[in-house]
Amino acid sequence: MTDADGPLRIDVRRGEPTPEELAAVIAVVTEAYEREAAMTLADDATQVRAWDVSARALRAPLRRDIGWGRFSG
């Protein structure tokens, strides 16, 4: 949570936790959130698609010296 999001609000529904207990809960939840957020980031490296690798050898290069109406052999 950034400072722009505003203050954190915690509602205690049952019991009377001490400030230390609340701090422990916040620390555990924050660590779990940060770990999950770090795992969801995509790599900046561009990945080569399998099609790009395999499509290169599909056919021989075109011969520019033969016209369109003639066969090469």
Image: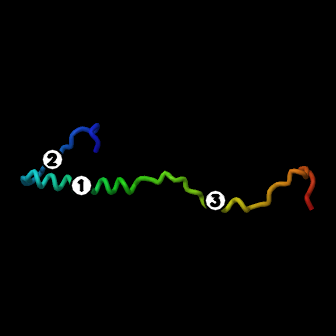
Q: Nearer the viewer, mark 2 or mark 3?
A: 3
- Give the quadrant of the C terminus: bottom right
Look at the numbered discs 1 and 3 and tell me whether their residues touch, using CB distance below 8 Å.
Answer: no
* Earlier-in-chain disc, 1 versus 3: 1
- Could you tell me how far apart the alpha carbons at marks 1 and 3 are, in whole angstroms? 42 Å
Look at the numbered discs 2 and 1 and tell me whether their residues touch, using CB distance below 8 Å.
Answer: no
Q: Secondary structure at mark 3?
A: helix
Dot 2 amino acid type = Asp
Q: Position of residue 14 (x, y in %)?
A: 9, 53
Dot 1 amino acid type = Val
- Could you tell me how far apart the alpha carbons at marks 2 and 1 are, in whole angstroms? 15 Å
Estimate how packed mark 3 is, as few (under 14), some (14 to 19) or many (20 or more) residues with alpha carbons within 10 Å.
few
Dot 3 amino acid type = Trp
Q: Which residue is label 2 attached to?
A: 11
Label disc, if present, on residue 67 of the rendered structure:
none
Q: Which residue is label 1 attached to?
A: 29
Q: Secondary structure at mark 2?
A: loop
Picture residue at 85% right of the left edge, 54% below the top: 63
Q: Which residue is label 3 attached to?
A: 51
Q: Position of residue 55 (x, y in %)?
A: 69, 59
Picture residue at 36% right of the left edge, 54% below the top: 38
- Could you tell me how far apart the alpha carbons at marks 2 and 3 are, in whole angstroms? 53 Å
Q: Is residue 33 left or right of residue 56?
A: left
Q: Is residue 18 left or right of residue 58?
A: left
* Earlier-in-chain disc, 2 versus 3: 2
Q: Secondary structure at mark 1?
A: helix
